[in-house]
Amino acid sequence: MDYEIVYSPIALADMDQAWDEVYEASADFDIADKYIADLREKVKKISKHPKTGERLCYEDIFTGIYYVTHKKYSAFYRIRAERIEVGRVLYNRSAYINLVLKSMRE
C-alpha cells in the first residue's frame, strides 16, 4: 500500500523558493526543474514505508516528524493514518528545527 503524499501550502512555497535558489545558482531552468522533481521523487520513494525516513529529534526526544534529504534540502513530514503530510521543505544549513516545530504543530 502506498501512502498518499500531501504537501502543505508552506511546503509548496518552500519548494518554489528552492527552485528559485537552484535557478539563481545554475541559471538553467532545466536544472532547477530536475532538482525539484528529484526532491519530489525522493519523497515518493518513502510512500510505501514512510518510517524509513530519518527521525527528527529535539533534545534527544523524537518529535513525531520524519525527513528525507535530497542534496541540500530536506522535506519534513508527519505520518497520519494513510497519508504522508509534508509540512516544510528547507535548506539543510538553515536553523530548521525551530521552523519545522513551529509550523508543524498538531
Image (cartoon, helix red, strand yellow):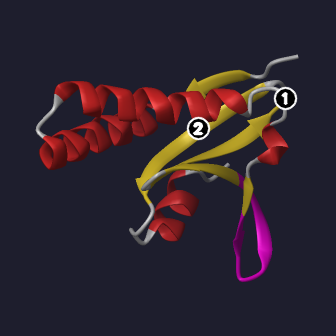
Q: Which residue is drawn at 74% across and 34% down?
A: 46
What percent of the width, then of the height, locates residue 14? 36, 42
Between 70 and 57, the one lying in front of the other is 70
Callout 2: SS: strand
What percent of the width, then of the height, locates residue 1? 88, 16
Decide: is 58 above or below 66.
below
Is residue 6 on the magenta stretch? no
Please name the amino acid that badge 2 sits on: Val
**Principal secondary structure, stretch drawn in magenta:** strand
Label annotation for residue 86: 2
Image side of residue 72 versus residue 27, left or right: right
Point out the tag, 1 or 2, that comes first from the N-terminus.
1
Q: Please, which residue is most extreme toward the right here?
A: 1
What percent of the width, then of the height, locates residue 54? 73, 56
Q: Residue at x 16, y 32 (%)?
A: 28
Q: Quadrant of residue 35?
A: top left
Write the start and end of the magenta stretch as one range.
56-65
The alpha-carbon separation of the residues under discs 1 and 2 comes to 14 Å
Please name the amino acid that badge 1 sits on: Ala
Q: Residue at x 69, y 30 (%)?
A: 45
What percent of the width, then of the height, locates residue 85? 64, 34
Neighbour tally class for label 2: few under 14, some 14-19, many 20 plus, Cα within 10 Å: many
Callout 1: SS: loop
Whether tag 1 and tag 2 are in contact, CB under 8 A, the answer is no
Q: Residue at x 79, y 34 (%)?
A: 80
Neighbour tally class for label 1: few under 14, some 14-19, many 20 plus, Cα within 10 Å: few
Between 101 and 46, the one lying in front of the other is 46
Image side of residue 62 versus residue 28, left or right: right
